[in-house]
Structure formats: structure tokens, C-alpha cells
Amino acid sequence: MQDKSIRTDLDKRLINGIQAMGLKVSQEQVDCLLDYLIEFQRWNKTHNLSAIHDLEESLSLHLLDSLVVLPYLDEFAEKFISKGQVFAVADLGTGGGLPGIPLAICRPEWQVHLMEVVQKKTVFLQHIANKLLLKNVTVHGARIEDSAPNLLNTISCCISRAFSDFGKFLSLSEPMLLSDGEAWAMKAKILDEDLATIPSSWKIKNNHLLNVPTLKAERRLFELVRVRELNA
């Protein structure tokens, strides 16, 4: 009975957050997001997927913090989908599947590649993809440098959530990206030394300030493109 009550409360909180962000998400997808969250924290007890162990905290810091980028990705994805192309996302250093799994749940028409080198995390990722029947998810359990050649020039968007500095993120992303593909970095407080790692061949196209419901901490989404694209 208590578990049902907790689930009901989480459902309300998640729906309120989704509505506050103006997202298009079905009740079936909400249920799937909660299944993911609960399974994530069940595994977290023994596999240390995240330092966040509280379900309510995890809902804000994991689910809503991942879903907040959807409106921006939806707009970018339309450029590919309108031309009959598959929109393919690579989530670099995804950990326990953030933001990749929530994105894959809410946008089943996208192809989502989860890239993670830590074995216990990739075991969980494959488990959750199978459990939730996420046919649009592919797990790459290796160093990104080793997985990237298999995805050469196939990815529309590389995304990362507090993964590395800009320079490393871009160097790992570039081989995978299509000619009109972009790199999207989710960041908290931005530091000048991080910005300084952006190579001269890349430039920040947009710097979006994100508003995550129930979360007061600063969140930003940096949209990066090759310099030649800006001059085209």
C-alpha cells in the first residue's frame, strides 16, 4: 500500500513538472519514466549508479533535469525528420542513462545511442532497455574512442550531461556527427577555463538557460556547431 502511495505521489510530481515545462508526453510514457526511475534506484542501492538515492530528489535531478532539453531537441530534430531522415542522438558518458533513457522513452521515433565505459552501468543500461522494451536504444559498452568508428558520420546530435570539458566532448563527438550535426552540452555553472577548451573550429551557437521545475540550481544547454556552418 505504501509503495502504491509513493508511486502515486511521484506520478503527480512528474506530471506537474512535465506540464510546467510544456512538454508533450503521454501517460504511458510517464509510467515508463517512473518504471525507469524506480528500477534505477533499486539498482543504485548495490551498483552505485548515482550519488542521489532519494526517489523525490532523483525525480528532479535525474528525470526533469534530463527532460528539460526536449523542446530544444524537438526543434532541432524537425530539421532532419522533415527531410525523411532518422534523428540519431548519441549520449556520451551516459552513466545510468541520463539524459538518454528519458529522451528515448519520450521520443520513440529517435534513435538513441548510449555510450558508457563502466561495465556495471552498461549492464544496467542493457537491462533497462530490455525491461522497458526500448527498441530505439543501442548500448555501447566501451571507450567512446573505440565505439565512435562504428558510428562514423551517422549521428545528428551528440549530447552530454556534466560529462567533460567542452574540448574533450567535441573531439569525441566530431567523428560521429553528420555534416549538419551538432554537439549539445548540458552544464551547471560554467567556468571560463571550460569555455577556453573549445577549439577554433567550433563555436557556441546558442546558450540556453534552462528552467527545471523544483530545482533552483543553474542549468544551461550549450548548442555548438562547426564554425563553417555559421558562415555558410
Image: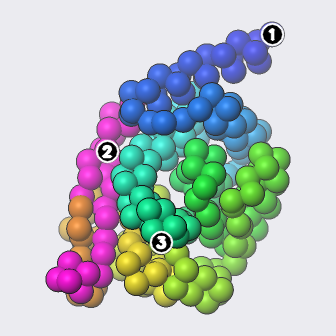
Q: Position of residue 78 (x, y in %)?
A: 42, 58
In the picture of the structure, the residue carrying the numbered disc 1 is 1
Q: Work out which quarter of the rendered image holds the N terminus and state it.
A: top right
Looking at the rendered structure, the kind of residue marked 2 is Leu
Q: Nearer the viewer, residue 3 or 176?
A: 176
Q: How many marks?
A: 3
Residue 211 included in the magenta stretch of the image = yes
Q: Residue at x 44, y 62 (%)?
A: 82
Determine whether the residue tagged by mark 3 lies in a helix, strand or loop: strand
For mark 2, does the 10 Å Cα neighbourhood hold few (<14), some (14 to 19), or many (20 or more) residues? Answer: some
Q: Nearer the viewer, residue 124 or 53?
A: 124
Q: Nearer the viewer, residue 144 or 84?
A: 84
Determine whether the residue tagged by mark 2 lies in a helix, strand or loop: strand
Looking at the rendered structure, the kind of residue marked 1 is Met
User: Of the numbered discs in the image, which one, if any, rests on residue 210?
Assistant: 2
Cβ–Cβ under 8 Å for marks 3 and 1? no
Residue 143 included in the magenta stretch of the image = no
Cβ–Cβ under 8 Å for marks 2 and 1? no
Name which of mark 3 and mark 2 comes first in the sequence. Answer: 3
Which image quarter: residue 231?
Answer: bottom left
Q: Position of residue 126 (x, y in %)?
A: 78, 59
Which image quarter: residue 194?
Answer: bottom left
Q: What segment carries the magenta color?
A: 207-232
